[in-house]
Amino acid sequence: MSFGYSFIALYLCIEKFASHHDLKASNLTGVDVGKNDISQSTKVWQSFQALGNIAFAYTFANILIEIQDTLKSPPAENKTMKRATLYGIGVTTAFYLSIGVMGYMAFGNDAPGNVLTGFHEPFWLVDLANFAVIIHLSGSFQVFAQPIFTVYEKWIASRWPPTSLFLHVYTIKLPFPRPCLFQFTLCKLLLRTLFIILTTTIAMMLPFFNAVLGFLGAISFWPLTVYFPVTMHLSHSKVKRRSREWMMLQSLSMVSLLVSAIATVGSIIDIVHRLEHTKLFSAKL
């Protein structure tokens, strides 16, 4: 799905640039101060927020260990994973970088945070890309929401006496050629439905694509992508304190923590600024 809507975005950017045959106004420092009512402080905070957008791309790191755990050996799992990661990151980096470059060539400094919102024709192709985004995010939501479901369901079960609400499993036979059963408890059905409604409503109220994306990337980058794997490596390999390797990895961790901190602050300030000038359910991406 990701490659699907990304290919559509790349095609639309190339088509827009080819149809105009000129480069849109842009520069290395982005939008000039004073244009579109952008102050120097706003530009600084949005630059910090952009670090969070970049960090969001590294959220894949928290599933690498899970994937590596499913690999068979020989060859050694770490060697297979290292090669797969190198090729995978290399290809995706080149691909998504090309989308960013073509987006700026097509829109210049007016490039939207979500490049798909910059196109209105052909309608069917843009709608197809947005539909692919919905499918992609629906699957991702199921994966990343599972820990949240587990935590609050255990917490509620520990505070309420055992009842059919938590224990009785209902089974529904689905009308498919192959036997397929849908099993659930009322607790899961009600609470998970309410959780999805709540998160969807909040997303509709605050559709600040870049700011929210930057905030999520900032708060998850350092603990999951840097601190956890670095700490695991230091413990597993028994790296001596104050050795060269230990100092380099700790320096990397501290720099990443600083990046996450300033990206978090920048994203929060951008969200607050947008809330002051936006009506709920009517914000632009």
Image (cartoon, grey):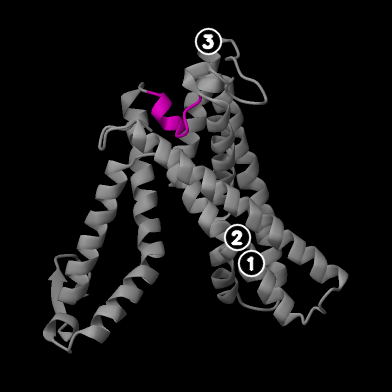
Residue for badge 2: 222
Residue for badge 1: 227
Amino acid at the residue labelled 2: Trp
Quadrant of the rendered image containing residue 245: bottom right
Which comes before the other along the chain, label 3 or label 2? Answer: 3
Q: Helix or strand or loop: what does disc 2 sit on?
A: helix
Dot 1 alpha-carbon crowd within 10 angstroms: few under 14, some 14 to 19, many 20 or more: some
Q: Is residue 5 left or right of residue 86?
A: left
Return the x and y of residue 87 as percentages of the image width and height: 68, 53
Q: Helix or strand or loop: what does disc 3 sit on?
A: helix
The answer to whether residue 228 is visible is yes
The answer to whether residue 2 is visible is no
Q: Is residue 114 magenta?
A: yes
Badge 1 vs badge 2, beta-carbon distance below 8 Å = yes
**Residue pushed farthest right?**
244
Q: Say which residue appears at 46% left-offset and 39% top-offset.
A: 270
Q: Say which residue appears at 14% left-offset and 65% top-offset.
A: 175
Viewer-proximal residue among 220 and 267: 267
Q: Is residue 20 magenta?
A: no
Q: Say which residue appears at 54% left-offset and 52% top-offset.
A: 218
Q: CA distance from mark 1 to mark 2?
A: 6 Å
Is residue 81 depicted above or below 138 in this figure? below
Return the x and y of residue 135 as percentages of the image width and height: 35, 49
Is residue 126 depicted above or below 132 in this figure? above
**Which stretch did the figure color magenta?**
111-119
Q: Nearer the viewer, mark 3 or mark 2?
A: 2
Q: Is residue 166 left or right of residue 1?
A: left
Which comes before the other along the chain, label 1 or label 3? Answer: 3
Q: Is residue 205 left or right of residue 62?
A: left
Q: Nearer the viewer, mark 1 or mark 3?
A: 1
- Which label was assigned to residue 20? 3
